[in-house]
């Protein structure tokens, strides 16, 4: 089958998931004919995506989260206001997506939680089936455990997840652990998507703490803790476009621009990972047997849900800030979940190929019926 990807470009997770699924699909004889990726001001699509997707990449302007300047987390009001002001621009992006789909004419579209996915299905009705993949679809599962007193936030995030997958054929919900699917809600629970590069690494017990943050403004919290604990070696990855490739703050704190190969090498040799609670980063650490301290970005309900789910799955501990003392208190209590996680992960190849095969059958039937008319 000829498959076109539609990928949310914010953060690293959806990009690496697309790379991983591309590897699985090609090994099963399918062809990824292109990847449409949303971009926004101040955020560059990491070079590793262009290098490893092995398909033409088409960019379009997309909404993004706006953060407070001094590491205060997501600025909800400004994010909403900016999106409304740029609505005409986003409608043009939707049309651009449609033109790209018409030009490529794929058999199937796979959307990685892209904002435009459901809107595209609703407005343009292209007739091309769409599968939606993301950890966020697990939050639609009736057995998902949410933070206490969060009904409004639950409604809003699930409304967003539904809107990204309107009229989709199925939702593949990536999960830290095995759970029953919910077919009536079009939810199939599947293992995480990790790049082959992760599975080829040999974990070693290092002495330094690795830090990954989704926005460089959060670095102020790391520096504040570091000033009081200069004996602890820290290596931090950020997306600070205005900084050089490597910023040596002092002898025990170094900031690195996001670099896939370098990050994974350090993840395999660190003592523990401290990260904003992105699903992909936690999965990589679990596969390599690294304890994780998950710090949800303030006002980012999705990450708060990820962190709670990660704790339930045995990934590590949750913290409200980059107070690294929390991970040091937790380390003696950590129970390695890597074997259990790997067993779940390695079932993924078969499950994803099977899901795509089901659509291939239905597409072949539809083509046969059309040829007989």
Image (spheres, rainbow, N blue to C red):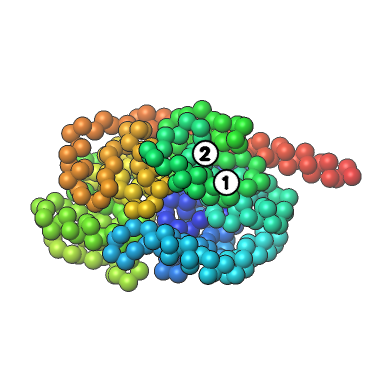
Does residue 105 show up?
no
Q: Quadrant of residue 126?
A: bottom right
Vertical order, 94 against 143 (above or below): below
Near mark 2 (Cα within 10 A), the count class, few <14, some 14-19 or many ≥20, is: many
Does residue 205 show up?
yes
Q: Residue furthest right?
A: 373
* Residue 256: image location, x then y, percent: 28, 61
* Residue 260: image location, x then y, percent: 37, 55
Q: Quadrant of residue 170?
A: top right
**Residue 293 marker:** none
User: Label 1 vs label 2: CA separation?
Assistant: 8 Å
Image point 63% across, 47% down: which residue? Answer: 166
Q: Earlier in the sequence, mark 1 or mark 2?
A: 2
Image point 45% across, 41% down: which residue? Answer: 151
Q: 282 or 142, which lies in front?
A: 142
Q: How many marks do you count on the picture?
A: 2
Image point 56% across, 34% down: which residue? Answer: 188
* Residue 247: image location, x then y, percent: 23, 66
Q: Residue furthest bottom?
A: 242
Q: In the image, is 244 to the left or to the right of 78?
A: left
* Residue 339: image location, x then y, percent: 35, 30
Q: Secondary structure at mark 2?
A: helix
Q: In the image, is 292 to the left or to the right of 25?
A: left
Q: In the image, is 284 to the left or to the right of 155?
A: left
Residue ID for mark 2: 140
Q: Secondary structure at mark 1?
A: helix
Q: Quadrant of residue 254?
A: bottom left
Q: Quadrant of the C terminus?
A: top right
Residue ID for mark 1: 162
Q: Are marks 1 and 2 in contact (CB under 8 Å)?
A: yes
Vertical order, 201 against 247 (above or below): above
Near mark 1 (Cα within 10 A), the count class, few <14, some 14-19 or many ≥20, is: some
């Amino acid at each position: 089958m000829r498959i076109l990807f539609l990928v949310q470009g914010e953060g690293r997770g959806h990009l690496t998931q697309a790379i991983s699924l591309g590897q699985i699909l090609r090994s099963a004889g399918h062809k990824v004919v292109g990847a449409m990726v949303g971009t926004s001001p101040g955020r560059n699509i990491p070079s590793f995506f262009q290098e490893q997707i092995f398909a033409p990449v088409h960019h379009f302007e997309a909404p993004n989260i706006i953060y407070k300047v001094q590491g205060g987390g997501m600025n909800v009001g400004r994010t909403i206001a900016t999106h409304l002001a740029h609505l005409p621009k986003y409608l043009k992006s939707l049309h651009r997506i449609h033109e790209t789909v018409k030009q490529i004419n794929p058999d199937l579209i796979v959307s990685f939680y892209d904002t435009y996915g459901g809107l595209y299905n609703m407005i343009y009705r292209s007739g091309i089936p769409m599968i939606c993949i993301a950890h966020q679809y697990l939050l639609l599962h009736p057995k998902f455990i949410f933070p206490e007193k969060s009904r409004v936030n639950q409604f809003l995030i699930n409304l967003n997840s539904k809107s990204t997958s309107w009229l989709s054929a199925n939702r593949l919900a990536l999960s830290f652990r095995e759970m029953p699917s919910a077919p009536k809600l079009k939810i199939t629970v599947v293992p995480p998507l990790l790049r082959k590069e992760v599975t080829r690494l040999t974990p070693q017990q290092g002495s330094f703490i690795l830090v990954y943050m989704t926005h460089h403004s959060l670095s102020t919290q790391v520096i504040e803790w570091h000033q009081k604990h200069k004996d602890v070696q820290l290596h931090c990855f950020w997306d600070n476009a205005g900084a050089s490739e490597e910023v040596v703050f002092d002898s025990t704190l170094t900031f690195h621009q996001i670099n896939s190969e370098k990050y994974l090498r350090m993840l395999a040799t660190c003592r523990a990972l401290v990260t904003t609670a992105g699903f992909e980063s936690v999965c990589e650490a679990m596969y390599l047997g690294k304890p994780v301290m998950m710090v949800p970005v303030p006002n980012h309900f999705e990450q708060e849900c990820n962190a709670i789910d990660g704790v339930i799955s045995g990934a590590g501990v949750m913290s409200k800030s980059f107070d690294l003392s929390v991970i040091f208190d937790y380390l003696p209590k950590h129970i390695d979940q890597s074997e259990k996680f790997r067993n779940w992960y390695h079932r993924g190849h078969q499950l994803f190929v099977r899901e795509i095969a089901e659509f291939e059958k239905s597409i072949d039937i539809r083509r046969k019926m059309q040829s007989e008319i």
